[in-house]
Amino acid sequence: MKLEKSKLIGNKTIQISGSKSISNRLLILESLYSNIKIGNLSNSQDTQLLKKALSSESETVDIHHAGTAMRFLTSYYSIQEGKTTILTGSGRMKERPIKNLVTALKNLGVEIEYLENEGFPPLKITGKKITRSKVDVPANISSQFITSLLLIAGKLENGLEINLIGEITSRSYIEMTLDILTKFGIQNSFEGNTIKIENFNVNGQLPIVNYEVESDWSSASYFYSFAAIGRKTIHLKSFYKESTQGDSAIADIYGKFFGIKTIFTESEHKLTLQPIENFQFPEKIVLDMNNCPDIAQTLCVTAAALKIPFEISGLGTLRVKETDRLLALYNELKKLGTATEITDLTIKSLGFKDAEENISVKTYQDHRMAMSFAPFCLIKELNMEDENVVEKSYPMFWEDLTSILAN
């Protein structure tokens, strides 16, 4: 897909669909408790795959590339008493580790087998009643592993106490899950490194709850990048000022480093991304993104486009996403003229030069690679390989882009 060198059109409004993170949590709870009415559900491929899996009667469930679905369903099927499920996915999914979650579930008494490689999908899960109520989990693993346990915890006879060992990664996503549980009346606490969830079984159902899903802040991040590079105002709907999404940190980050002021219009649930005139860009961006690693790619591309040196830490989970995102950034930023140095936890710019001619961005089957690199078309023409990867989280991305760009 060719992206012509473009200019940003000011004052356009984009309606982004519901948060994938919130939607997927709600779908699991809806299946466990019923009586949940979900509005503005994400239209992402990941959410649709999870929804299909939850309604499937088949013994084998294939969730393709949907990592969230793999993690959430591992715990979900573990408590489906008397049901055996084979949970599998794409070739890349079979390379993404799940051992820490499986170990935690086994320690609770669940019966799970690895069908191919130890520590990786596919899994054979035999559902049973769980009576154990305490488990230790490494704190530096994907927050989705922890959330997977939290979502089923209220259904366990004796509730669940999770002791997180070490430094917590992506804490904001854990807090998002707990906030949702609280809204549904499921009692919980998070003190120090210990999370406690009380058993919640009111005739097996929650009271009827209507939940309007906030739009996705991860998806909003790409428009912050466009506003920062193109220096024009963009409006986004439907967002809340007091968001539980960790990636809402993008508002403060882009305000501080790129001069993009975020204005909330509460009555319309609208964000206005407004560039500050004559903003003085920093000499260097130094930032720990441990709580919001999914927006690191966006920030790196924005900094590369504006030639602002950067040093980003807290990125350990990026190695085991849809691709090795740190290595992918290293490879593709070079095409934009930005040399970098990466470790298992960090990425650091080493210098800037002119971008290559005929840039072709490889997406590595990773939706965020495509969308985070797209704003560079304000600097130079790009060819985006495998543009359809955006369907995983934001199917309307290219259509929405067309509405804010002019050649």
Image (cartoon, rainbow, N blue to C red):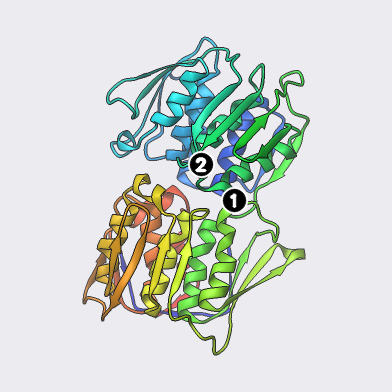
Residue placed at 64% from the left, 68% from the top? 271
Residue 240, how many percent across, how many down? Answer: 69, 59
Residue placed at 56% from the left, 47% from the top? 171
Q: Is residue 340 shown above or below 81? A: below
Residue placed at 40% from the left, 61% from the top? 297
Q: Is residue 392 left or right of residue 291?
A: left
Q: Amino acid at mark 2?
A: Ser
* Residue that mark 2 sits on: 143
Question: Contact, CB < 8 Å: mark 2 with mark 1?
Answer: no
Q: Quadrant of the N terminus?
A: bottom left
Q: Is residue 354 left or right of residue 235?
A: left
Q: Nearer the viewer, residue 8 or 140?
A: 140
Q: Secondary structure at mark 2?
A: helix
Residue 396, how many percent across, how many down? Answer: 48, 57
Report crowding for label 1: few under 14, some 14 to 19, many 20 or more residues within 10 A (C-alpha). Answer: many
Question: Can residue 243 be seen from the camera position used here?
Answer: yes
Q: Secondary structure at mark 1?
A: loop
Q: Which quarter of the picture shows residue 379?
A: bottom left
Camera-nearest label, 2 or 1: 2
Q: Is residue 370 left or right of residue 109?
A: left
Q: Quadrant of the C terminus?
A: bottom left
Q: Amino acid at mark 1?
A: Gly
Q: Which quarter of the picture shows residue 91?
A: top left
* Residue that mark 1 sits on: 18
Q: Earlier in the sequence, mark 2 or mark 1?
A: 1
